[in-house]
């Protein structure tokens, strides 16, 4: 009985440790993406007529992408509903396609 209790406590501790690690990793990825936002947005919104871009946990924020796209001459024309992980696909059209 004691072995089962100890095993259960170890299992709970490992689960909590894994959740803490995951939250920290997502936060780190999101901070890295925010720091590189100008470069990421310049690469994505490079003059093509239509652009798709994914936002969600560990990625650029929705508002940063929409404002960055607008500043590069793009308009948001569509978006998917968030999936079970909170990820959305955004569709943009270039305001003045060449």
Image (cartoon, helix red, strand yellow):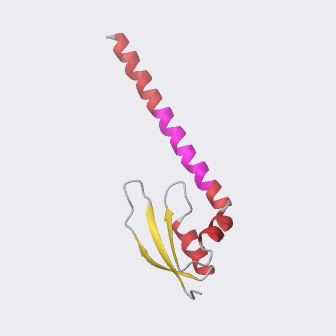
Q: Which residues are magenta?
A: 16-31
The percent position of residue 46, horizontal first and vertical second, equals 62, 74
Residue at image position (39%, 62%) is 82
Residue at image position (62%, 79%) is 72
In which quadrant will I find the N terminus? top left
The percent position of residue 13, horizontal first and vertical second, equals 46, 27
Is 34 rendered above or below residue 73? above
Residue at image position (42%, 58%) is 86
Is 18 rendered above or below residue 63? above
Q: Please state which of residues 32 and 23 is positioned toward the viewer in this rendering.
A: 32
| Residue 30 falls inside the magenta stretch | yes
In which quadrant will I find the C terminus? bottom right
Name the quadrant containing residue 10: top left
Tell how many labels.
0
| Residue 15 falls inside the magenta stretch | no
Q: Please state which of residues 39 and 7 is positioned toward the viewer in this rendering.
A: 39
**Prevailing SS of the magenta stretch:** helix
Is 7 rendered above or below residue 50? above
The percent position of residue 14, horizontal first and vertical second, equals 47, 28
The outermost residue toward the front is: 98
């Amino acid at each position: 009985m004691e072995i089962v209790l100890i095993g259960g406590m170890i299992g709970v501790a490992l689960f909590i440790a894994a959740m803490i690690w995951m939250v920290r990793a997502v936060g780190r990825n999101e901070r890295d993406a925010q720091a590189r936002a100008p470069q990421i947005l310049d690469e994505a919104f490079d003059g093509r007529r239509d652009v798709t871009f994914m936002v969600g946990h560990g990625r650029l924020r929705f508002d940063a992408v929409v404002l960055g796209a607008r500043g590069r001459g793009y308009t948001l024309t569509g978006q998917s509903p968030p999936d079970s992980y909170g990820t959305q696909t955004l569709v943009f059209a270039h305001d003045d396609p060449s």
